[in-house]
Amino acid sequence: MKYILDPACSNRCFYIDKNNPYVLYCDLRKVEKGILDKKRPNYDIKPDHILDYRYLPFKDKSFKHIVFDPPHLTSKKGMNKLNGLLQSKYGSLNIDTWKSDLTLAFKELWRVLDNYGTLNLKFNNYSIPFKEVLNLFPVRALYGTTTTTKKHCQTRFFTFVKGAF
């Protein structure tokens, strides 16, 4: 049984156990080894399930925990045309539709999260300020962390807890 959902797993880079039996690893695409990064020939994107996190095919309250690490970069064509190594590896949000795309994603993730479940959001403010992303979420984060990666941007984790409604 899968209790944990990762709807944008990419290559599962921050997982200690990249094949945990409790996690359903999902992504919008599948990419074979050696195609995206010639310097890292074993880099691949192999989700258990291919899906769009804006339209999840799961019943309400299906998961106890959700890990959400959406793309952080923006581009004119979003996932339809990925330029450069970072966009090719991690994807891109459409510069014109990112707000509605993330709003849909948050609604769907909240719908499939069980009562008293937790959702961890990982985001980098390189293209979009944290405040703008957090304002799209239906509830406030319980807590979050800050990790400085460069002087001009940060990666942060935010944890949300769903009450019984």
Image (cartoon, rainbow, N blue to C red):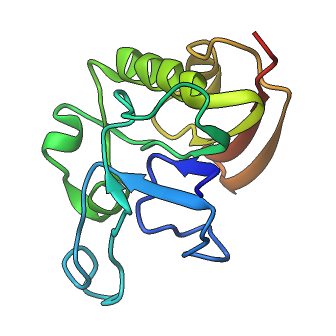
Q: Quadrant of the N terminus?
A: bottom right
Frontmost residue, 51 versus 147: 51
Q: Considering only vertical position in the picture, is 164 above or below 113?
A: above
Q: Quadrant of residue 56?
A: top left
Q: How many marks?
A: 0
| Residue in the picture at 38% in, 63% down | 48
Frontmost residue, 140 versus 127: 140
| Residue in the picture at 66% in, 46% down | 154
Q: Quadrant of residue 137?
A: top right
Q: Quadrant of the C terminus?
A: top right
- Residue 2 lies left or right of residue 91; in this view the side is right
Q: Which residue is farthest right? A: 143
Q: Considering only vertical position in the picture, is 131 above or below 91?
A: above
Q: Considering only vertical position in the picture, is 1 above or below 61?
A: below
- Residue 113 lies left or right of residue 51; in this view the side is right
- Residue 160's spot in the image, x, y percent? 76, 29
- Residue 121's spot in the image, x, y percent? 64, 39
- Residue 100's spot in the image, x, y percent? 37, 14
Frontmost residue, 3 versus 161: 3
- Residue 105's spot in the image, x, y percent? 45, 26
Q: Considering only vertical position in the picture, is 135 above or below 152?
A: above
- Residue 14 lies left or right of residue 33; in this view the side is right
| Residue in the picture at 34% in, 55% down | 49
